[in-house]
Image (cartoon, helix red, strand yellow):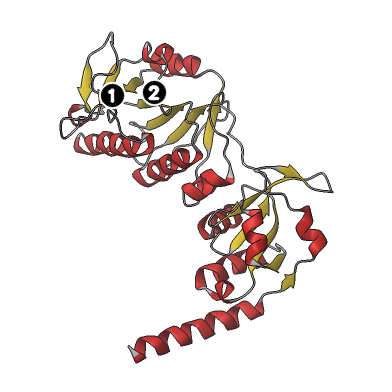
């Protein structure tokens, strides 16, 4: 135990000395009052910004360069000596981002009382990518891409968790309906552990048009439903029995309602996750982010098996 304590002390001293190399400023009261707690705001110079919070979202936002970064705020005190926080500061410093010390109370206000891990970032918002922009696939198995298509996912925590799973498992594109869907907010970024800063989400004003176009190009449109939730013109297959053998669009509906009837009518196949027991009334389904992770793993596993 004494050895571990000495190691921690040396690590803390090293990190502290590294932090001292950076140019940190003390934020003024007037500057702090200019920061808003809303998801998006406009400052006195007319710049549209929002406050990203948490170590991973802030670090990846700085590194990826998809946002315009205005200022990094770091908790003054012991928290700012953690190696993860120092890494954020170093990357921001490399790119000429002003860094300021603030109190935990100030960070709490900036993040709307959410867990910020001692760092907040004032930056321009991220938006859904334009549907006209084409995705350049860099994967070796480009002949069998998988796109995840979301309809009306409204909970930012769910969207963030879905993005994290999609990126980790290897989805080629994430697309979403623009209407009735939550925006790409700092809450989504935090819930995704920063994946939202890396993986763009394409927004579609008309999902039906896109699905019809991809189906005409030979893609398979796969919808998702509860085991006994809908009457369908196509059979419902358990996800473990579905084999992904060609370019596929996996459709996921929003919380509560699932896929709309107009999108269900375009599906060539429907898949479901079977329950492992007889369910009590009122517990008929999984959380949408959990279900999405299971379905993605099942489809991508079947693709690997069919190579």
Instruction: Give the residue drawn at x 61%, y 75%.
Output: 77
Above or below: residue 86 compared with residue 134? below
Please state if 261 lies on the left or on the right of 234 as rendered. right
Quarter where residue 48 is shown: top right
Q: Which mark is residue 258?
A: 2
Residue denoted by label 1: 226
Which residue is rendered at x = 28% and y = 8% of the image?
Answer: 233
Viewer-proximal residue among 183 and 305: 183
Q: Is residue 260 visible?
A: yes
Give the label on residue 117, or none: none
Say above or below: 152 vs 56.
above
Alpha-carbon distance for marks 2 and 1? 9 Å
Residue 294 in the image: above or below residue 198: above
Quadrant position of the C terminus in the picture? top left
Residue 222 in percent (x, y) is at 32, 22
Q: Is residue 75 above or below residue 113?
A: below
Residue in view at x 35 percent, y 90 percent: 3
Quarter the N terminus occupies? bottom left
> x, y percentage for residue 123?
68, 51
Residue 179 at x, y percent in the picture: 56, 23
* Position of residue 201 in the picture relative to residue 286 (left or right): right
Secondary element at tag 2: loop
Would residue 96 appear left or right of 62 to someone viewing this image? right
Asked if residue 94 can be seen in this view, the reply is no
Label 2 vs 1, first from the N-terminus: 1
Count neighbours of disc 2 (C-alpha within 10 A) and say few if under 14, some if 14 to 19, many if 20 or more.
many
Residue 265, percent across and down?
Answer: 37, 10
Which secondary structure, mark 1?
Answer: loop
Question: Marks 1 and 2: in contact by CB < 8 Å?
Answer: yes
């Amino acid at each position: 135990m004494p050895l571990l304590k000495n190691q921690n002390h040396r690590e803390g001293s090293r990190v502290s000395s590294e932090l001292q190399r950076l140019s940190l400023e003390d934020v003024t009261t007037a500057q702090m009052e200019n920061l808003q707690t809303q998801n998006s705001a406009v400052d006195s110079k007319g710049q549209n910004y929002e406050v990203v919070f948490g170590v991973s979202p802030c670090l990846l936002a700085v590194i990826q360069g998809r946002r315009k970064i205005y200022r990094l705020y770091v908790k003054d005190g012991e928290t700012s000596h953690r190696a993860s926080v120092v890494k954020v500061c170093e990357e921001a410093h490399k790119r000429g981002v002003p860094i300021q010390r603030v109190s935990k109370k100030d960070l709490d206000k900036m993040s709307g009382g959410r867990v910020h891990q001692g760092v907040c970032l004032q930056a321009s918002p991220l938006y859904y990518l334009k549907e006209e922009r084409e995705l350049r696939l860099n994967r070796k198995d480009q002949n069998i891409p998988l796109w995840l298509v979301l309809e009306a996912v409204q909970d930012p925590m769910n969207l963030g968790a879905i993005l994290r799973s999609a990126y980790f498992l290897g989805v080629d594109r994430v697309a979403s309906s623009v209407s009735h869907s939550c925006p790409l907010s700092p809450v989504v970024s935090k819930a995704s552990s920063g994946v939202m800063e890396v993986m763009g989400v394409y927004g579609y004003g008309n999902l039906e048009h896109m699905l019809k176009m991809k189906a005409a190009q030979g893609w398979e449109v796969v919808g998702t439903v509860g085991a006994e939730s809908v009457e369908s013109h196509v059979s419902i297959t358990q996800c473990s029995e579905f084999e992904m053998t060609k370019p596929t669009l996996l459709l996921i509906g929003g919380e509560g309602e699932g896929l709309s009837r107009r999108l269900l009518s375009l599906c060539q196949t429907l898949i479901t996750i079977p329950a492992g027991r007889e369910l009590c009334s009122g517990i008929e389904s999984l959380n949408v982010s959990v279900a999405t992770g299971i379905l993605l793993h099942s489809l991508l596993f079947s693709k690997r098996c069919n190579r």
